[in-house]
Image (tube, coloured by chain):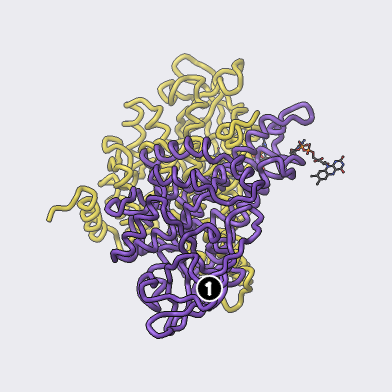
Chain colours: A yellow, B purple
Amino acid sequence: MTLNPIDEFRAELRAWLNENCPEEMRDGLMSEEGICWGGKDWVFTSEAQKIWLGRCASKGYTVPTWPVEYGGAGLSREQEKVFGEEMALVNARSPLESFGIWMLGPALLHFGSHEQKLQYLPPVARGEVRWCQGYSEPGAGSDLANVQTHGADQGDHWLVNGQKIWTSYADKADWIFALVRTDRDAPKHKGISFLLMNMDDAGVETRPIKMISGISPFCETFFTDVKVPKEQIVGTENRGWDVAKYLLTHEREMISGGGAGLSGGGRALGAVINDTMDEMGATLRADAMRCEVDTLAIGLTLERYKDQSEAGQGAGDASAMLKYMGTELNKQRHELMMTAGGSDALEWDGPLGNRAGDWLRTKANSIEGGTSEVMLSIVSRRVLGLPG
Amino acid sequence: MTEEETMLADMARGYLDGAMPVSKLREMRDAGSTHNAATWKEMADMGWAGVLVPESAGGSGMGFAAANVIAHEMGKTLAVSPFLSSAVIAATALRQVSDARAQSALAKIASGEATYALAVDEGIKFNPESAQMDARGDGNGFRLNGKKQFVVDGVMADRLLVLARTSDGLTLFDIPADRAGIDREKSNMIDARDVARITFEDVEATGEDVLGAVDSAMDVLRPALQAGQAALAAEMAGLSAGAFAMTVEYLKERKQFGVEIGKFQALQHRAAHLWCEIEVTSSAILNAGRMLDENPENAELAVSLAKARATETAILAVQEGLQMHGGIGMTDAFDMGFYMKRARVSAEWLGDYSYHAEKVANMRGF
Ligand SMILES: Cc1cc2nc3c(=O)[nH]c(=O)nc-3n(C[C@H](O)[C@H](O)[C@H](O)COP(=O)(O)OP(=O)(O)OC[C@H]3O[C@@H](n4cnc5c(N)ncnc54)[C@H](O)[C@@H]3O)c2cc1C
Ligand SMILES: Cc1cc2nc3c(=O)[nH]c(=O)nc-3n(C[C@H](O)[C@H](O)[C@H](O)COP(=O)(O)OP(=O)(O)OC[C@H]3O[C@@H](n4cnc5c(N)ncnc54)[C@H](O)[C@@H]3O)c2cc1C
């Protein structure tokens, strides 16, 4: 009997996973500590993590849908689904997560030159270079196009001065993609360029900021007379807003996936609820049921939009809907997890591990990548056509 | 949706806008009528009545996803027809049985010649497993005694699918609605739909009248209910989309404080939130249609998810819709009230939110 191509792909993949996914990497873990972020200073948490990354990278499985020449496996949407299913079947950890994969990659694939793609993407796929996102500034949050960090034209380079804030993992990243004003006279959306900057360059400084959940994942980032060669622009000078917006649609889709609990991690709410069934009231159970219904439906919506969009193109304006629904749900789910945990959930590193830290971290979901209010405004203007 | 489904939706929309706009429902209500035989015949001629009837039995055999597409378009303008009762529920029940009688019954559904209603509920809530209607054996046959309520299309239907308790379980009977001992009383429904309360007094039935096997009603009824719940969910999603479209249009046109009210962010965000809910619900409905077509044995979760979501979304859509219309939304001359009343009735039919959410939770290990 001959298998059809997709079944054949599945069979090969299954065999490969069985052989190559280390036992320690089969716990489906996606908690903050379990993630492999990569980068030149990355310290692997275990030998298995290193082996797993290396093996996946050699097959293009860290970025399965990217073209093979840029470090991916060139999978179709159908194959990508199978990939997700088979990874879930062995409960495999994601080999690598990064802003390079989620954000820079899609933007470069869309707007970058062939040379830029060859230069920047394979190191991301191999986990060798870690990127961070330099969008927000003290005066440019929701009003992102108000960025003031300035790039002065010096012929073959820009001289960049200014400050970014809330830059996640800026202190651990090797490179940053940043929105920089390169024309102060143009209307605010039309004077921004999308620049790639090396964090090791002279004049780049980061200061970590501690979050309510106790960790310090984000930073203030300062640029003082940083020289950025002209080749390090993505897209056209002063048209960086187009790149920025496109990247955001991918970022939003990614954040919403966490909301629907699809990227693994954590236990299903049902299991948590069952553990404490005897001690909990009917109201909590009813709330959890409602949450479960919405979780399933939002998960289906994410899949539907992935099916609809051209490979790797993302959901466009609808990413605002996915982000809003997914993140609001995730916050709600973690409130329920806290209630279900009772007083055990109230201790740092208590009987329930980091449940409180995880709960607090979700509060950023409806802020980072654009707030819920901004998402609703996008839907209102761009999808519904209501007057601005 | 696939290309074919989009074409079907466009075609259905074209027909319904002419034949069954909301104004038709208003006319029917004002005239005290609940069924339009002429439009049902036209729908049958387009293959809708036979959407789930195999081509071998004279149907169009388009399948469950297609039935959902039609129901969705019907919902947008609150079209009145026995589509759900006959073409979806009864046809699916009959499809579970392969004898010649079932085949000829299916052919009659497809041609529009016979209409059906499902008589399951006995109390105020949908709970088929607890049906108590008595159908004790009587010689070679059965005698049906008891009461049913909320029988949708029960007044106009030619035939009834009746769920009743036999010696060792539940049995589904397929009998003519005018059989001796059956008394149908029209319920005066808030949404002006055809609904009946039905009394059965010593109604005689034979083995011939049993659909499927005696004491095994659920084998036949379960798939039929799932098909009906999915299509009803699709109809409710269509209703939500219809109410929403009216609302967005109104936001763009109504002026207060010298500007279109759609300029006020308080309303923009409510409208945007509603759109998001409608989108998420559509996914659940598409999924239910696909599951019923491709993997019917495992469709229960998908169907309950769809009906649960559709119920919540429809209730939200009509409430938000009415609120954003201000005073005019409260008037009978305006259509929003029709949407609100239909949403409430549909929310209840074939299981309310908590019935289906409970099922989802159970299947998800709660
Ligand atoms: C954990 C975390 C990680 C982050 N990581 C990064 C990163 O790596 N890189 C990066 O560049 N940024 C990052 N951010 C920043 C994030 O993108 C911004 O916080 C976000 O865009 C909101 O901007 P703001 O904080 O200035 O809030 P503001 O824009 O000041 O908003 C304050 C409140 O006002 C509301 N609001 C603002 N404008 C409107 C309006 N027009 N209508 C209605 N309501 C409005 C907002 O919704 C919000 O509720 C991160 C943020 C967090 C919390
Ligand atoms: C049952 C009933 C009885 C009534 N009885 C009386 C009566 O006895 N006497 C009398 O004088 N009137 C009466 N009214 C009228 C009532 O006061 C108005 O309907 C009400 O003030 C709203 O005005 P509107 O209907 O023009 O709606 P609109 O003002 O057109 O409002 C439409 C929608 O836009 C919203 N909206 C409007 N402006 C804004 C804004 N700036 N920001 C955000 N949202 C906005 C509203 O909240 C509403 O959701 C009655 C209404 C009803 C329904």
Mark 1 residue type = Gly
The chain ID associated with circle 1 is B
Q: Position of residue B179 (x, y in %)?
A: 48, 69
Q: Position of residue B35 (x, y in %)?
A: 55, 50
Which quarter of the picture shows residue B326? top right
Most foreground residue, B323 or B340: B340
Residue drawn 28% across and 44% down? Answer: A60
Most foreground residue, B281 or A45: B281
Q: Which residue is outermost to the front?
A: B180
Q: Which residue is mark 1?
A: B181
Which quarter of the picture shows residue A117? top left
Residue drawn 29% across and 37% down? Answer: A67
* Disc 1, SS: loop
Q: Position of residue B350 (x, y in %)?
A: 53, 62
Residue A380 visible: yes
Cβ at disc 1 under 8 Å from ligand 2: no
